[in-house]
Image (cartoon, rainbow, N blue to C red):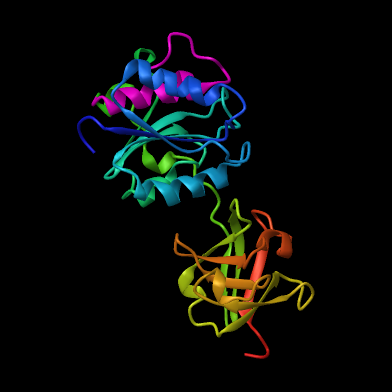
Amino acid sequence: MRGPAAVISLTTDYGLADGFVAACHGVVARLAPAVRVIDVTHLVPPGDVRRGAAVLAQTVPHLPAGVHVAVVDPGVGTARRGVALATPGGFLVGPDNGLLLDAAAALGGVTAAVELTNPGWLAPRVSATFHGRDVFAPVAARLALGAPLAEAGPAVDPATLVRLPEPVVEPEPDGFTAEVLTVDHFGNVQLAAPADLLAPLPARVRVGPAGDGEAGQREAVHGRTFGDAPVGALVAHADSAGRVALSVNGGRAADLLAATPGTLLRVHRSARS
């Protein structure tokens, strides 16, 4: 992306009870008052980099091309780098802890990367604990105004950027085992498995913890949407991000399955199918 951007997006784990989000908005407003700020979410669970990465990657393709700031940063103030990445679909700004790379892939891949070390691009005094305000927001504002990425700091080899471990996805003859990637506000369980692993399975499947045999297994409807299962029943379906999801019609699949991010679940053919 070249030239000024009309939009900056913010994705953080800052919550809504404090002034952290407003401070980031304020920095952008002072430096780039005409730029619109879109709040993706500030309710990522504290320090949950994988959840932040998933939310960011699944959202940025639907936003206007712009500058996307993400801050889920348990390593703030340590030796971890602050970075800005260029992609064909816009810029990404945040910590180099794996948070940005899935989103970069969704925007066409990293074409350039820099470490954010130019003091002229940062706050006059940089707090050791609030880089969202003092590093990432001012960098985003300058990029949105059209300043060259190369001025933000030295180039970084994209191959050296920190990557999150690949989630578990194991195809099997009668189904698959996959790691829970996220649990959303409604209690829907998103698996790391792509939807095409579910497609060949029959109208009824079994779902339960991996490695437990039939213990804890539950029958689920293989459907297209929540209402394809009776009220209170489990449904396995392709979600809006193209991954396998488990939902309960009128309930919470996460509670029913005792599933949290990182849980391994097995989805396979039912003996009755």
Q: Nearer the viewer, residue 216 or 104?
A: 216
- Verify whether residue 231 appears in magenta: no
Quarter of the image containing the C terminus?
Answer: bottom right
Residue located at (76% from left, 77% from top)? 213
Residue located at (52% from left, 75% from top)? 198
Q: Which residue ends up furthest to the left in the rendered image?
A: 3
State left or right for residue 60 relative to residue 5: right
- Verify whether residue 128 appears in magenta: yes
**Quarter-of-image position of residue 76:** top right
**Quarter-of-image position of residue 117:** top left
Q: Position of residue 32 (x, y in %)?
A: 31, 20
**Quarter-of-image position of residue 7:** top left
Quarter of the image containing the N terminus?
Answer: top left
- The answer to whether one can see residue 115 in this image is yes
Q: Which residue ends up furthest to the bottom in the rendered image?
A: 272
Check the image and report above or below for 53 versus 193.
above
Residue located at (44% from left, 41% from top)? 100
Check the image and report above or below for 8 versus 110.
above
State left or right for residue 144 relative to residue 129: left
Q: Position of residue 125 (x, y in %)?
A: 48, 9
- The answer to whether one can see residue 153 in this image is no
Q: Nearer the viewer, residue 206 or 248?
A: 248
State left or right for residue 14 relative to residue 92: right
Residue located at (38% from left, 22% from top)? 28
Q: Position of residue 113 (x, y in %)?
A: 34, 35
Check the image and report above or below for 221 versus 77.
below
Magenta-tinted stretch? 121-146
Q: Nearer the viewer, residue 129 or 43?
A: 43
